[in-house]
Image: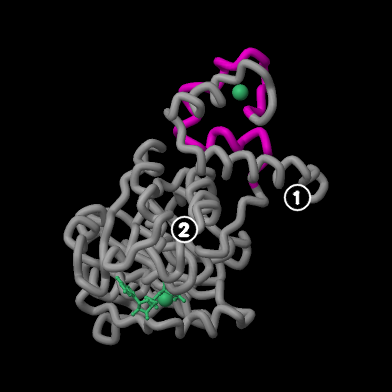
Amino acid sequence: MILTGTIVKAVSGFYYVETTDGIYECRARGVFRNNKLTPLVGDHCEMEVLEESEQKGNVVKLLERKNAFVRPPVANIDQMGIVFAAAAPEPIPFLIDKLTVVAEHHHIKPFLVMNKTDLSSEIAEHLPKTYQLAGYRIFCVSAAERKGIEALKEQLQNQVTVFAGCSGVGKSSLLNLLGDDIRLETGGVSRKIQRGRHTTRTVELFSLGSETFVADSPGFSNLDIQDIRVTELEECFPELHEYIGKCRFRGCNHVSEPECAVREALEQGKIARSRYESYVQMYQILKEIKEWQR
Ligand SMILES: Nc1nc2c(ncn2[C@@H]2O[C@H](COP(=O)(O)OP(=O)(O)OP(=O)(O)O)[C@@H](O)[C@H]2O)c(=O)[nH]1
Ligand SMILES: [Mg+2]
Ligand SMILES: [Zn+2]
């Protein structure tokens, strides 16, 4: 019998496939080795049932992927919840923006989660407006006070979501509130593991009902912008889109050129300054990376 399902976990050669009949422990048949395709967590697959009673099977076919990451190894992500704390640790807009840019580059929809709203900092006060101007949804929550959790749950419905953000912002604490069966360690445990070499190797998808999965992996927080070409950067800032092609000079980089539509919008307050500053900082980094270094 052939069933279709989603790979939710991969551990030393075993793939755990969630189906409507429960989770099956599977091996991947040799056919994958021949065409150099490795099954990833998040893959939709066809599975041959070997032993119904013990829920064992073989992954026999991978269905087409929407997207895939190598580090961390995961496929078919719909959206990225970028988590930061209102304080402790204080938010660093550049790090948040790096994640929105990486998500956009992979055509994964980002949304923002400001956690620890039971605490406050001056910089956090500006961030909801900053990200709304960019067109992003932002959820203000507190895992400690269990505030804003229902709205966040709604955002996750029928999507595969990964949570990313700096260590200590409360990603695992939030996930524990989102699923009844999720019991992740909190309080900086993964911070210690994060220094190890194998941190980005594991991803597990947690099921929150049909077609709804969430993942917590330290690997997502280390995603970097290095693979993005400098010419692709403006595309990764949605609030710049309406100005692209309206600058005086063709190929304007929106950094120092005169009569730049982006910088005019910035002066008019239509683009948030911290987002523009992140754009310029990323532009400076990416323009130094030569094609042969990729
Ligand atoms: N005051 C306050 N503290 C919180 C809140 N949410 C989480 N914390 C605390 O923040 C610390 C870090 O939380 P974690 O959930 O482990 O953070 P994380 O993002 O998973 O961190 P890493 O796994 O290291 O990436 C813990 O001590 C939590 O108890 C909150 O809403 N308010
Ligand atoms: Mg954690
Ligand atoms: Zn320009």
Q: Give whichever of 231, 42 is nearer the camera.
A: 231
Mark 1 or mark 2, earlier in chain:
2
Judge from the rendering whether residue 144 lies leftward or rightward of residue 97; answer left or right.
left
Contact check, label 1 and label 2, Cβ < 8 Å:
no
> Splitting the image into 4 quarters, where does residue 18 fall?
bottom left
Amino acid, disc 2: Ala
Q: Quick check: 69 left or right of 160?
A: right
> Measured from the top left, where is residue 89 in percent x and y?
45, 69
State yes or no: residue 248 in magenta.
yes
Q: Nearer the viewer, residue 14 or 196?
A: 196
Residue 125: x, y in percent?
35, 52
Q: CA distance from mark 1 to mark 2?
A: 22 Å
What residue sits 39% from the left and 43% below the top? 131
Quadrant of the rendered image containing residue 48: bottom left
Farthest residue toward the top?
A: 248
User: Is 151 drawn above or below residue 250 in the view shown?
Assistant: below
User: On the image, numbered disc 2 is attached to which residue?
Assistant: 75
- Ligand 1 is in which quadrant of the figure? bottom left
In magenta, the rendered stretch is: 228-254
In the figure, residue 115 lies in which quadrant?
bottom left
Q: Is residue 258 above or below residue 95?
A: above
Residue identifier under label 1: 294
Quarter of the image with the N terminus in it: bottom left
Q: How is the image coloured?
A: one colour
Amino acid identity at mark 1:
Arg
